[in-house]
Image: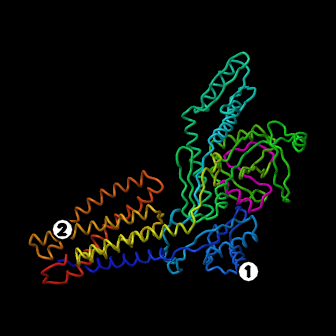
Amino acid sequence: MNRYPVWKYLLIIVTVVVAVLYTLPNLFGESPAVQISSARATVKVDAALQDRVTALATKAGFTPEAVLADANSVKLRFKDTETQLKVKDAIQSALGDDYSVALNLVPQTPAWLVAIGAKPMSLGLDLRGGVHFLLEVDMDAAVSKSLDKTAGDVRRELRDKEIRYGKIDRLRDSVVVQLRDAQTVDDTANALRKALPNMALTEAKDPNNYSVTLTFTPASLLQLKNDAVKQNITTLHNRVNELGVAEPVIQQQGEGRIVVELPGVQDTAKAKDILGRTATLEVRLVDDDQSHLQQALAGNVPDGTVLMTERGRNGQPSPILVKKDVELTGDSINDAQPGFDDHSQPAVSISLDSTGANIFRQLTHDNVNKRMAMILVEKGKGEVVTAPVIRSEIGGGRVQISGAMTVADANDTALLLRAGSLAAPMNIVEERTVGPSLGKENIQKGFESTMYGFLAIAVFMVIYYRVFGVSSAIALSANLMFLLALLSMLGVTLTLPGIAAIALTLGMAIDSNVLINERVREELRNGMSPHMSIQNGYAHAFATILDSNVTTLIAGLALLIFGSGAVRGFAWVHCFGIITSMYSAVFVSRGLINLFYGYRRRLSTLAV
């Protein structure tokens, strides 16, 4: 009557073994490490770099315990932080600025566990240590950048419609188009309302001032600011992911602020460098007037132009004068891939969206036999990659950049263009570093609180329910292993609130066993036989357990869907804990009771 078939016992054994294997990596902890990654995508991380840094560490007198390499970085693991700091200094001085050498933490999981895919849980900033930044998006710069783009759109639209205009002024929060008469004002306003529906237009028909002024509507301004934050978050994700930072947290906080948490990174300066590595492409026309270039070199830059440098094939940059008006930006880029041009020279092939393709076609149509500068802007500095002469109109949305670049330069440029650009600059409002020692202290306190809670529950259950209490305590320990293994397998980030959720799960899981045990007692008091009491106790308690867990799971899912940050971390552990507790409290504990009592034919009493 109270016997499981063999397959159920096998299922319990398999799940327990798998849980043990995937929980084990969490017991080995982490070691200090030195992480070497590329500071520029032109500098690659390969086997040669791995051999070089290993040799540098050995030469400094410190042999690494392990060398871990992936596509983006090489990590050298050491036994203590003192050795870590000395090796970092030695490697940094030898490699120079081409590589980013940062302090990190790596797990000490044995190779045989790694081979089966077992890895420790991802720990949040409060448990692992790392750096925390609160960034504020410069909304004024976002508006200014959008107005610059609007001025270019206005210029192209009026040219397309063949409407003559005098001058286009970009003021602080508006774009003003100077016109010659009232009819031109009407024609301009009609054309721009269709082309730029998100802008508010103000017409002026004073004899001394015929103009159309464009400003953002409140709705479009709010949308612009929201889009700026979203684009910056996406770009930061791309950059951080490219550099291999594990489990970063990048999310919006408030209207214009972004929280960035990089667990395991102890070097604040390197973290800032990670966040600052973005690039975009700008297309501008070149001012080929040599007299203007000479004036600029003498320190008198003509109005409407900017003096920049152009890459040279011999490695020597040369000065070039480009116009301030940005004709096309990297916002219109769909994809960028390295390749070769018709002369077998390294190049970058760029795919533009429909808007960018139309702009580029019109730009090349109107400026045949003029030079066009392709400018790569990285860390706020612009460099002209190439400045070819426009021979004919170029349509189709496919653009190729070639010039003074190597294969590595082409890969670098394509990588940065794919990662995107920041919609607006960001200022660091708050920064703090959580040391690994503080993280270990938090883990220790969380472990002790969970352990003492578990022991108190187990002692109470054994004293109060005897054999059924022992079964409940064993099922509770299995539940804890199932939960830790599930969190490790799925890569859920554990934080301090997550540890609180584990403690809460233990209390909720034992609730189910209390319901079962009391129901078994009730059946015995009603005169049922011991075997029937076990069967009815589990059967009747299951409906109540299911209802209570489903309602609690709904609350947990609501926290997961609508919460953020620490709340989501709590919700993940809470929801998984409900699932594992249902399995362990009902299925595993019943298996133990069946094993102990199920094979006794003449059973007169139960120790419950």
Q: Amino acid at mark 2?
A: Arg
Residue pictured at 76% horizontal, 71% vertical: 94
* Residue that badge 1 annotates: 59
Q: Position of residue 369 (x, y in %)?
A: 82, 41
The correct choice, above or below, for 206 with respect to 308 in the image is above
The residue carrying mark 2 is: 519
Kind of residue sitting beneath label 1: Lys
Name the image quarter holding the C terminus: bottom left
Q: Secondary structure at mark 2?
A: helix
Q: Position of residue 29 (x, y in %)?
A: 52, 74
Q: Is residue 523 above or below residue 240?
A: below
Q: Is residue 451 magenta?
A: no
Helix, strand or loop for disc 1: helix
Q: Quadrant of residue 601?
A: bottom left
* Magenta segment: 388-417
**Residue drawn where x is 76% and y is 54% of the image:** 402
Query: In the image, 162: left or right of 471?
Result: right
